[in-house]
Image (cartoon, rainbow, N blue to C red):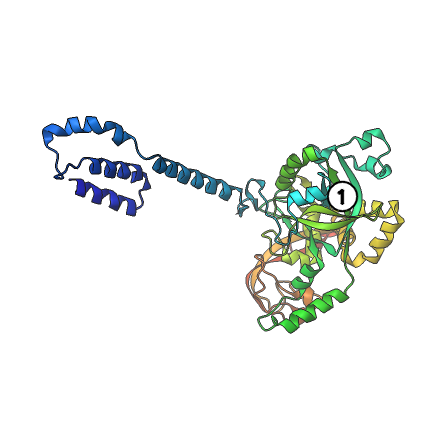
Amino acid sequence: AINFMKKIMIKSLFLGFPEFLPLFLLFIYFSTNLSSVNGFVAPDQSFSFLRSRRNNIIRLPSAIIMSLSNAKGQQQQQQQQQQQEPQWDPATQTYKDGIVPAHESMSLSLEELLSLNHGKLKIFGYGSLCWHPGSKGVLSLANIAEDEHDHERKDNAVAKRKVTTDPGRAIGYQRCWAQRSADHRGTTEFNGIVCTLLSDEEVWRFHHPRNGDDCGEDMEEMEKMLMQSMRPSMTEGLIYTVDEDLVEHCLAELDFREKGGYARDVIDVIEDETGNIVKALLYRGTPDNPAFWKRVYLDLRLAAAIMAVAIGPSGHNDVYLLNLDKFLSHAAKHSPAVALALEDHAEDDRTGELAKMVKMLQNDYRPIFLFGAGSNEHNQLLLSGHNDECSAVYTSNGKHDVKFTGGYGAKVVDELVEILLVVPRETDGGDAASA
């Protein structure tokens, strides 16, 4: 009977029932102590034998109990770590629970960053943070207007504020309008567009993707030389400084705010007033993030049309764009040095150009959005452009699996692509044929 029970429990363990382990160990201990010299205990002696052995039976080795407890604790710890790992949710098009990743190029840990800034957290904002720190939360303690007129913190009220701002710029980075927004300036059904920050190398890689034959050392060296010969880009923004006791809450709020595909990163930024270079945290989405929208990055007209009409939980998409454009114009008026830098780097930032296009669309045209696929031999899918880059066809999932045919677009498109029709507003009210 003992041998039979052993076989049953061993099979149970191998079949994936670890809950039998404590019972199995207890049974082994029990059966071992139940053996006499001859290996047998008479029935009339068994109960007295059990009573004499009850303390030994219930007293399992403490090492076994501790190992079982430790195993359970490790399992719970692994589950907690998995819950803390960033997980992209396709349904909401955001990272679950506001847990965002850290960029792979992030050179400093959070502790190292805080140590460099004497316990304070510096954050570089290049999008909505330039004009909207928030109506509540840690960053809402900032007063951008007051800080602008008192950079030296001579006013006691400003000096005592726990969150302050300074204008600053990032060198070697471009503000790019290529990030889908399903949680702020659009919805999951109709995404809005917000900006992200790409390094010059990332922009180069995006426009010059490597083929299988282009991965040699000579090609890499040539690319490095070309990128080094190019003038670094510049992005104007706002640097927040957060007191040490508010850092934890601030990061939790920003992680949730930037959950739409962004990742934490640390870069060098230059303070406009002092010229000092400081390390700052920022949130940016690289071309491989799940919310990066390749089509609108290449097609400025489509991007402008979307931003002219998109609306999300945080408001109208055009408000995001136009307020950022106002911030840049104001920064140029306030500082001649900033004005000169923005003029020299005008080609690095399409914000002003997009703002003009959005205003024109809203005043004079009505955009109509369609999706199409199939034959495009006669450009019936309206995919032709003025040059090869604009006519490059990107499917909605970002794959470039269609062929380029110069300025005439692809002849056949296998997957749905976005199609934009722009109708003059004077045709509004007419029938479909006139439109």
Residue of label 1 = 239
Packing grade of label 1 (10 A; few <14, some 14-19, many >=20) is: many
Q: Residue 210: x, y in percent?
A: 62, 68
164 versus 383 height, above or below: above
Q: Three-letter amino acid code at disc 1? A: Ile
Q: Give SS at disc 1.
A: strand
The relative height of residue 61 versus residue 321 in the rendered view (above or below) is above
Q: Is residue 15 left or right of residue 125?
A: left
User: Which quadrant of the structure image shows residue 207?
Assistant: bottom right
| Figure label count | 1
The reply to whether residue 379 is visible in this rendering is: yes
Determine the image quadrant of residue 141: top right
Judging depth in this view, the residue of 256 and 16 nearest the camera is 16
For the N terminus, the image quarter is top left
Please state, as top left, top right, bottom left or bottom right, where the C terminus lies in the image.
Answer: bottom right
Q: Percent position (x, y) of residue 43?
A: 10, 31
- Asked whether, in this view, residue 379 is left or right of residue 1, the answer is right
